[in-house]
Amino acid sequence: MVNGHPLFVTIFILGAIVFFTGLILRLFIYWRGQWDLWAFLKGVFLTLFSVKILNIIKVFFLDGILQRRLFGQDQLRWLMKVLIMIGYPGILIAGHLKVETMDQFARFPHVIKFFYAPFCDFYFFRDVSSPSLGLIDALFAISFDLFGAMILMGELIAIYRRFVAKAVIFKTSVGDIVAVNLLGGWFILRFFCETTSILTYSLPDSVAQYWFLSFTLSKIVSPLGLPWASLNYPLWSLSGFFLATLVGFIPYNKKLWHIITIPVVMFINLMPKEAFKPGAKKTPIPLSIKELIALDSCVKCGSCVDVCPVYEQTQQLETTMGGIFTNIKSFIRNAYGLPGIFYGFTKTKDVPKEYSEHPYLCTLCGRCTIVCPAFIDTKELRIAARGFMVEKGKYPHIIDQLAETLNKFYNILGEPNEDRPMWVQALEDLPEHMFQRERAKTVYFVGCVASYFPMTKRIPQSFVQILNKAGVDFTILGGEEWCCGFPLIAAGMEKKAEALIQHNLEKVKEKGAERIIFACPSCYHIWMEQCKADIEIFHSTQFIKKLIDEGKVSFKERKMKVTYHDPCDLGRTSGIYEAPREILKAIPGVELVEMEGNKEQCKCCGGGGDLEMLRPDLSAALAQAKIEEIKATGADMVVTACQQCIRTILTTARRKKIPITVMDITEFVLKNMDGG
Ligand code: SF4
Ligand code: SF4
C-alpha cells in the first residue's frame, strides 16, 4: 500500500504522470507549428456541430474499428487490427463499467475509480462470497476474457507477421518491440493474475468458469501446488507495472501514439481548410498543426510502399511516404523538441542534405492516400514536406528555375505568353474572334501543356470545335491566361503561386463568365481548391457529358475496343471516374475494357508531381510500366482526359518505339461526333 492505495494502482498513477509529461512534450511541438487559435477553435466548433460529425462516426466505425481499408489489401493484417481495435476499447470500457457497479469503490471519486478499473477483479475475486454469479457479473467476466483473448490473438498475428512471415517492410525498432511486448504482456499477466486469484481464494467452479481462459489456466497450473496466495499480490503489482509502462510509453512511441492521433486525424480531416491557416506571427516550425499531427500518425506500416509506382522502380524506402514522414518527424522532434532545447537549435536545426531530393521523388498520384490506415492525406502531407524543405533551403534548385520562369513568362516552358493561343491557327474555318471574345458565359482555360506542346495541341483544337458545334457561348483567355500555379504548389512553393491564381481569377471575372472549363485535371483541381468566387467549375469530361445529356452532342457508330486511363488528379484527387466512362459508353460500337488497375487503383503514368522535371528517367520508367498495362488489355487505343498523361505516355512510346494509340477524350469525341 502507498498512501492507502495498493502498489499496482500507485504504479499506474505514476505511468499516467509519465504519459501526461509526454503528452505535453508532443503538444509543445504542435504549439510551435503554424496556427491561428481562433480559426482553429472555430473550425472545431463548426465541425462538431455539423452533419459532418455523423460522417466521422460512420468513418470511425467502418474504417477505425472495422478497418475497411485493410480488408481488400491484406486480410491477415486486417484480422490483427480488427481484433486489437475491438479488444482494447472493449476491455477498457468493460473494466470502467464494472468498477462503477462495485460497492468497494462506491466512495471513490471517478478519477480514482479510473485507476482501479484495470484491477477491479483483484477485489472482486477477494470479496466474492456467493456460490454463483449474477447475470451482469457473469457478462463482465466473459467479456473480460473474450476481449483479452482477441487482443492476444491480434498480438500473436502481429508477432507472426513481423518475425516469421517478415511481412513488414520497414525495419523493426527496439521501441516497436517494446511496444508489442507491453501490449501483449499486460494481457498475458492479467490472465495469470486472474488465475492466481481464482486459486488463492479457492473460487468455486460455478463462479470461476465465467473467466473461461483464466479458469482453464487455473485447472492446468493448480497441480503445481505453488504458493498462490504469496504470488497473487506481486503478480497483480507486476501487471500494474506493465500497464503503467504501456500507458507511460504511449507518447514516446509511434506505434502507441497513433492510438491517440488517429481519431484526431479523422476529425481534423473533416475540418474546414481555413481552420489551419497560419497565424500572423512566424512560427519556428513551418508546418500547420494538422500537418504535424498527421506526421505523428504515421506508424511506418508500409501500406503506402506496397502501392507506390515510384517505389516499384526505385526500391528506395526513404522516398516513400513512410520514409519521408519518419525522417522529417524525427528531425522535428530533435530540433524543436527537448533535444533542441537542451543542446541548442544550432546543433540540431539543419535538415540532413540527403533528405532534400527525397520528397520530390513522387508523382503525387495519391495511390497511397487511399490505403493509408492512419487516414493521413499523404499527398497533401508530401506537398507540405516539400514546403518544409523549401523553408529550410534544402531542395533541388531546379525548382527555383521553374519559379523564375513562371515569374517572368507565366508559363512553364518560358515561351512568350502571348503565343499561348497559337494552336488556333491550325484550325479550318476559324472565326474572326479566334475564340477570344470580350465577354462570354463560359471560359475555356487551356493550360500550359496543351497550349505549347505540339503533341497535345490537338486537345484545345478538338475541344473548341466540340463547344462550337454544340453552340456554347465561350471564350479562351489567350495571352491573358497564366499558369494555374499547380507546378509551384506541387513543388512546395504555394505562396509563389498566389499571384498567378489571383490574375487568372480576375481575367475570368472580366469576361463576365458564369462557368469555367478545364481539360487539364491539375488546373481543374487547383481551381476547385483555390477559387472562392461564385463560378461553376467543370472538367471537360463533365461538360461533354452534360452536352450529351442535353442532346447537343451525339455520335456516329465506331467499332473499336478502347481502354481508359484515369488521370490521378481527375480520378483519385477529384473523384471523377464515371463521366469519361459514360462518354465512351455513349458512342455506339465502342467497347470499353478496363486495365488491371483502374479507377481508384489506377497507376500513375509518371507525369505528375514535378517528377519529370527532376528525374525524367524515373518518370519514363513509370510511363513504360503504364504502357505495358495498357497493351495487356488488348485494346485498340487508350483514351485519357489529361494533357500531361498524353504527353508522358506518347513520349515514352515514341522513344521506345512501342506502337500505341493514345488519345485525349476531347479528340476521341470530336472524331466520333455526328457531323465531326
Ligand atoms: S503514410 Fe500511412 S500507409 Fe504509409 S507508412 Fe505511414 S501510416 Fe502506413
Ligand atoms: S503519391 Fe503516388 S508516387 Fe507518391 S508516394 Fe504515394 S503512391 Fe508513391
Image (cartoon, grey):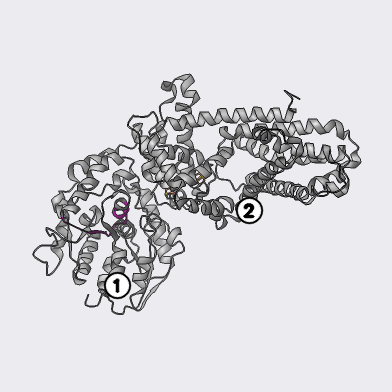
Q: Is residue 123 visible?
A: yes
Left/right placement of residue 551 relative to residue 121 reads: left
The answer to whether the residue labelled 2 contacts the one labelled 1, judged by CB atoms less than 8 Å apart, is no
* Range drawn in magenta: 511-525
Q: Residue at x 71, y 38 (%)?
A: 118
In this orientation, which residue lies closer to the viewer: 513 or 434?
513
Residue 189 in view here:
no
- Distance, label 2 to label 1, CA atoms, is 46 Å
Would you name the residue on which mark 2 appears? 79
For the view shown, which residue lies furthest in the left direction? 432
In the displayed structure, would residue 524 be above or below residue 30? Answer: below
Q: Is residue 433 above or below residue 611?
A: below
How would you rate the neighbour count of disc 1 (Cα within 10 Å): few for under 14, some for 14-19, many for 20 or more? some
Secondary structure of the residue carrying tag 2 is: helix
Q: Is residue 157 above or below residue 571?
A: above
Q: Which residue is mark 1?
A: 548
Q: Position of residue 185 (x, y in %)?
A: 71, 38
| Residue 200 place in picture, x, y as percent | 87, 37
The image quarter containing residue 280 is top left
Which residue is pictured at 78% across the width and 33% down the height? 235
Q: Position of residue 580 (x, y in %)?
A: 35, 66
Could you tell whether 479 is left or right of 34 in the image?
Answer: left
